[in-house]
Amino acid sequence: MTTQLILQGNALPTFLLEKLLAATGASAVEPRPPQVTCLPGARRTPAFDALIPSIEAERLDWAFMPTGRRLQDYGLIAFDMDSTLITIECIDELADFAGKKQEVSQVTEAAMRGEIDYRESLRRRLALLAGLDARVLAQVYAERLLLSPGARELLAAAQEAGLRTAILSGGFTYFTERLRIELGFDFATSNELEISGGKLTGRVVGDIVDAAAKARHLARLRNELGLEPEQVIAVGDGANDLLMMAEAGLSVAYRAKPATRAKASIALNFSGLDGLLNLLH
């Protein structure tokens, strides 16, 4: 299967185009308005990866994709929730009500960069929330939770094209279930917060949904739907999304950490989530 490099956003400078042609072995350039450039026959190489900082300095999103793929060629799209489908990290906002947002946010950031094991990071952060009034969950959902730019548009287009949709999150069921119902997702899985006496206990019910669990859930859904990996799209932002993204034929790093972008098929750093639609005709 032939591949192509697609860049979108600002105009592509000539000096950078020449370097990209040399780095990827692409033989031609196809401009696609608005502000989309396609390099057919491009191959991802270490030389391309070395150019990623220059590409991003020009505020360009980039994608290595099979040639000629359309949205309807896929059967499943799975999203991480925190900082991907939505703009916030729910656990950080809960910590704000406990007066511990900075402390929890630092652990969250380290976990997303892959510096701390996700299970350990979640245990440490949850312990700081022990005793918090459970009614705060409703406040965070109502007052602070916002969908990422383009999320509704991408989801609506995916549903219209016949894809099944999933939220696979290391976050919390209070939020994933409400989003599943509100937005019409087919599936959702995440961690269930333990509540006792109207307070958070600082623990979850059952096993922690970590990176490996997210990957297992995606593989299970893919197999249940009778799909091949190349028919699956996975969207995430952090190190704990990499295993899930590896189970998908098309992996999308949305405003992601560098380690996540380095292993993704697509990096959307500047467009909304609906920037993916420009790439799939």
Image: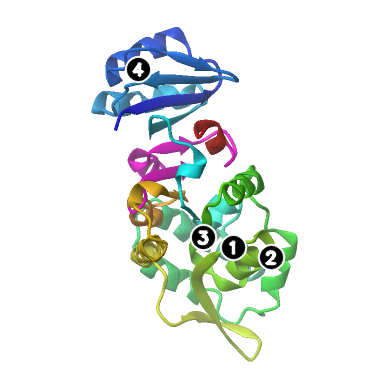
Residue 93 % position (x, y) = 62, 62
Q: Quadrant of the N terminus?
A: top left
- Choose mark 4 or mark 1, whichever is in front: 4
- Residue 11 falls left or right of residue 38: right
Is residue 262 highlighted in magenta? yes
Point out the stretch of residues depicted in magenta: 247-274
Alpha-carbon span between mark 4 and mark 3? 35 Å
Q: Nearer the viewer, residue 29 or 121?
A: 29
Return the x and y of residue 215 as percentages of the image width and height. 36, 61
Inspect the image, locate mark 3, and give the three-letter code of the amino acid beneath it: Ala
First in residue order: circle 4 vs circle 1:
4
| 280, 146: nearer the viewer | 280
Per the rendering, the mark at residue 20 is 4
- Mark 3 or 1: in front is 3
Q: Amino acid at mark 4?
A: Leu
- Name the residue: 38% across, 29% down: 67
Name the kind of residue labelled 1 in the image: Cys
Residue at 61 percent of width and 65 percent of height:
180
Question: Which of pointers 2 and 4 indicates the residue nearer the eye?
Answer: 4
Of pointers 3 and 1, the one earlier in the residue sequence: 1
Give the left or right position of residue 16, taking residue 178 as reference.
left
Percent of width and height locating residue 30: 46, 15
Marking on residue 140: 2
Per the image, the residue denoted by label 3 is: 166
Q: What is the residue that sits farthest to the left in this orientation?
A: 46
262 to 85, vertically: above or below: above
Of labels 2 and 4, earlier in sequence is 4
Q: Toward which corner of the image does residue 214 lie, by quadrant?
A: bottom left
